[in-house]
Amino acid sequence: MVKEENIQAIKNSLFVSDISIGRLYGKTGTGVVDGQNSNGWFIGLIEHGERVYYLATNL
């Protein structure tokens, strides 16, 4: 079982911004091939009331 305080700590570290439709959380990342940055991504979620919307974008 994961403690609620640990869940909150992770959510706090991923918080991006309050936006018009809810709270945005996310994380960026970069792929490396042969020592060169090859792509990037942003994954996250938006909390809107009781609903949660997940997103992933390849940059």
Image (spheres, rainbow, N blue to C red):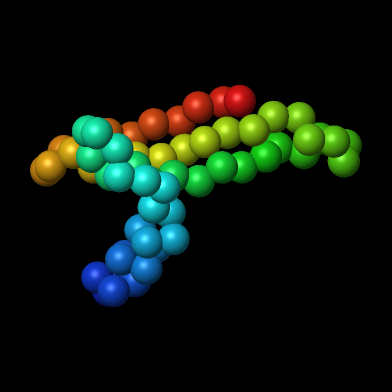
Give the quadrant of residue 52.
top left
Q: Where does residue 46 sit, x and y in percent of width and height?
A: 29, 39
> Which residue extends farthest left?
50
Q: Residue at x 37, y 61 (%)?
A: 12
Q: Where does residue 27 sit, x and y in percent of width and height?
A: 50, 46
Left or right of 11? Residue 33 is: right
Give the quadrant of residue 40.
top right
Q: Where does residue 9 sit, x and y in percent of width and height?
A: 37, 68
The answer to whether residue 21 is above or below residue 7 is above
Query: Can the viewer see residue 50 in this picture?
Result: yes
Q: Residue at x 28, y 74 (%)?
A: 5
> Which residue extends farthest right?
34
Left or right of 14? Residue 50 is: left
How many numbered discs sit on the rendered protein? Answer: 0
Q: Residue at x 87, y 41 (%)?
A: 35
The quadrant of the image that shows the N terminus is bottom left
The answer to whether residue 40 is above or below residue 47 is above
Give the quadrant of residue 14.
bottom left
Left or right of 24? Residue 30 is: right
The answer to whether residue 6 is above or below residue 39 is below
Left or right of 54? Residue 49 is: left
Q: Residue at x 61, y 25 (%)?
A: 59
Query: Can the viewer see residue 1 in this picture?
Result: no
